Amino acid sequence: MEKILYIDQKKIDLSKCEVLYSRPFSEESLKEDFDAVSGNWSVDADGWLTGFHRDNSGGMLYSKASYGDTIMEFDAYAVPPCGNDLNFVLRTEGWDFEKNDAGRGYIAGLGGWWLNKAGIEKYPSCMPRVLTSLFPLESGKIYRIVTGCMEGHCFIFADGQLIVEMTDPNYQDFADCGKIGFGTYASHIKYRNFTLYKPVSEYRELSYTPDF
């Protein structure tokens, strides 16, 4: 996949970004590096991290470490017959045990919001929220996902295509949040080939060249 990402006036070269985590999924890494706080999480013989949750709520897995702004790159798919809520979280504080719900953070995903939409939302206020129905999730199809957050500028690429981006004007609300995670909502999702980067971007100037 192309290692150069363009979002708004940013150019990101993943080959120049520091790798923060690239350990393959295994039962050992699952136990040592992540907290499975809701749903059922395991790693199969082929190295796929599996999240399974039947309830109409979030099945969540969070990193134990807090990283700040990050870019996540991984393969993922919805296991047939499931075809909804291939989810992931950025800049999160993890699970809110008092409320028994996901804590503060950016929740993003494909096939979500009950109408097979791709999107990003600031949780728990759910505002801002950006959704699109132009990239529906296909059950059983493996996607290469690149998603990240840089000072409240959040984005999702799937198979090299920019699907959605969102800018949070009050990103400082999450200054003390820095974990990442994976999620499934009443679905069955698998993840593999995960790499976590510390984002570095270059400014790119955008302008029109009138041809009239």
Image (cartoon, rainbow, N blue to C red):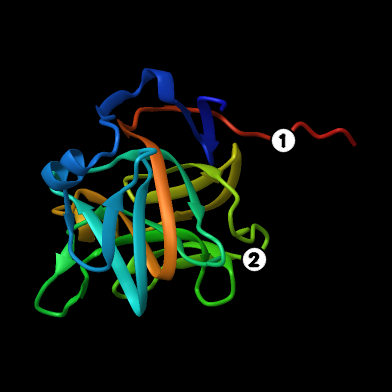
Using the rendered image of the protein, determine whether residue 67 is visible from the camera's viewpoint.
Answer: no
Residue neighbourhood size for the residue with mark 2, other residues' Cα within 10 Å, grouped as few (<14), some (14–19), many (≥20): some
- Label 2 element class: loop
In front of the other: 17 or 74: 74
Give the residue type at disc 2: Ser
Residue neighbourhood size for the residue with mark 1, other residues' Cα within 10 Å, grouped as few (<14), some (14–19), many (≥20): few
Which is closer to the viewer, label 2 or label 1? 2
Residue 100 at x, y = what percent? 17, 77
Residue 119 at x, y = what percent? 50, 62
Residue that sits furthest to the top in the current view: 16
Using the rendered image of the protein, determine whether residue 150 is visible from the camera's viewpoint.
Answer: yes
Residue that sits furthest to the front in the current view: 45
- At horizontal 56% and vertical 27% (from top left) the residue drawn is 1
- At horizontal 20% and vertical 45% (from top left) the residue drawn is 30
Quadrant showing the C terminus: top right
> What separation in Å lies between label 2 and label 1 (alpha carbons)?
29 Å
- At horizontal 49% and vertical 48% (from top left) the residue drawn is 156
Residue corresponding to mark 2? 133
> In screen coordinates, is 104 left or right of 14?
left
In front of the other: 73 or 55: 55
Residue corresponding to mark 1? 208
> In screen coordinates, is 188 left or right of 6?
left
Residue 12 at x, y = what percent? 45, 28
Q: Are marks 2 and 1 in contact (CB under 8 Å)?
A: no
Give the residue type at disc 1: Tyr
In front of the other: 183 or 40: 40
Q: Is residue 96 above or below residue 10?
A: below
> In screen coordinates, is 12 left or right of 17?
right
